[in-house]
Each structure stands twice: as C-alpha cells, then as structure tokens.
Amino acid sequence: MNIGLVITTLGREQGLRRLLQSLEGQVVAEDAIVIVAQRNLKAVETLVRDFATIGCDIVVTTSALGASRGRNAGAEALPAGEDYLLHFPNDTTWFPPGTIAGIRSTPSAASAGALTVTDENGPKFHLPAAGTPLDRWNIWTVIEMGLVMRRSVFTSLGGFTESIGTGALTPWQSGEATDLLLRLMHAGQADSFVWLPADIAIGGISDPHGLSNSQRRRKLRTYARGFGRLLSVWEYPLYWRAAALAGGLLFGARNRSSFHIADGWWVFVGRFEGLTGRCVGKNTTTAVDR
C-alpha cells in the first residue's frame, strides 16, 4: 500500500519540522507527501528543502483557507494514476517509529479505516475492536487525523464537504470526517472499513493546547456547533440529540484533564446552535486562529 500524506497547515514551521523528522526512515519512494500551505507559503517551501532526502517526493501547494478545502486540494495534487491510501495528519501530528508501516498494513480491499490518535493525556478515543462494523454510533470515534481512505473512494465521494470543518466559511467548524464517513455508509462502501490495532497510533496535541480561556471556549463552542449540525442534517434520533445536548453540560467535568468544569456551558450552547441551525453573536466562523 503506497501512502499519500496530505497535510494542511497555516505555516507553523516548528510542528511541520517535527512531523517531517518523524517520517524519516518510514516513508519509501513510492509514497508521496503533499503540504498545503494556506499561509507562509515561502517559509514552508524553504523548510521542505531541508528534507530532500526524506525518502519520497514532497509537493508544496496552497489553497483558500479551510482544512477541508486544503485536504481536497492536497489530494488532487498527488501524482496522478496511483490509488494511494490517503491519510490527513495535522501539522501538529507526528509519527512514532513503525506507524507508517502499521498504516501500510491496512488490507488492500479496505475502502477506509481508522487508527488511534493520542495526545499528552493518552488516546483521544478508544476505537472499537477489529471486525466491528462501522455504524452511525461508533463513527464519532474517527477524527480527521485518524482517518485513512483509498484515493479512489475519496474521489468518488467528492472529498470533504468544504462548507464544514475548521476554517470553513460557516459556523459549522467540525465534523468533516464524520460527514465523509456517513456518506461512505450511504454509498454502500463501508462494509470493508477496518479498525487498525491500538498500537498503530499517531501523536498529537490536546484541543486546548496553548489556548487562552476565551480561545479555548470559542473553539469548544464552534466545534460543538458542527457536531450538533451533523446530528440534525443526518437525522439522528431525537433522543440521541437530546442526550448529546444534555451531555454538553457535563463535558468539562468528564474531561477535567484538559478542560474546566465551566467549559461544559460553551459546549451546550454550541450544540444547541448546531441542532437548531441558529447562531447567536458575531465571529461565528472562527474556531481558532494561531
């Protein structure tokens, strides 16, 4: 399985350097890396020159702002003719030794799959056991940097929906991976979805890392809007929407390693806005800008 890594970045050089350093000795000539620099393009191009011997080609391109836009542009920029297994790390992601080999072990018949994403507090989600069918309930454990998908499948689905996700020009600042996988299920292509073993895991940072109180709560609210919106658009049962809304208030208490108890209020408000499709206040389209 040849790997196509698509990395969308605002040009954060320190994180990108760590990511590329972690790939040295893991990628091979048949793999490909595309970096979509939505800011600081020249600086990213300069940085990439330090990795001329990384083991595979690195393409640097750009796109309009928005993670979904960047990932779609990056997938299109991959060399033509190869059905890569796509993976979409953040620019704050890194690959422990052996991770790329683990991703490469994804069965060739799989349409898509998921691997574990960790941060300083441990796994962000505990994935279902191998062989568990992908469904509307466990689909929420798959996040963008934990997703793998065949390029041909990704293309047939139309890629990520560019009107949702971080940096989109709408209030719905999360949920692009979930939406993509729900479309995979709707298209009848999820039967071959695989959950990779827990020891195949990438590193990352926690959601509130480096944010002030106000930035953290704004991000929580905008991400919660995206979550709530998907519940409505994809017609989840009313009891499930109600449970998700009530659970928002407990978010801070359940995640005290990274958040404050009062943060649950902002998750509740965001989920309510998403569920109803009505937002209050200004600057509803910015989750975080750093």
Image (cartoon, rainbow, N blue to C red):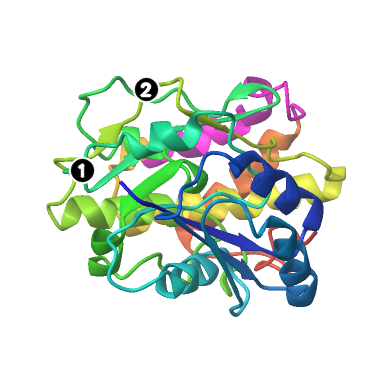
Question: Residue at left 65%, top 49%?
Answer: 20
- The overriding secondary structure of the stretch rendered in magenta is helix
Name the residue at 67% across, 34% down.
264
- Is label 2 or label 1 in front? 1
Res. 141 visible in picture: no
Q: Residue beneath label 1, please? A: 108
In the rendered structure, are the residues bearing label 2 and label 1 in contact, judged by CB atoms less than 8 Å apart?
A: no
Give amino acid for label 1.
Answer: Ser
Name the side, left or right, on which 260 lies relative to 86: right
Q: Nearer the viewer, residue 36 or 188?
A: 36
Quadrant position of residue 258: top right
Q: CA distance from mark 2 to mark 1?
A: 16 Å
Residue 50 percent coordinates (x, y): 75, 58
At x 27% / y 40%, what residue is drawn? 136
Query: Which residue is denoted by mark 2 in the rendering?
Result: 197
- Point out residue 66 in the picture as x, y percentages from the top left corner: 59, 69
Residues drawn in magenta: 241-261
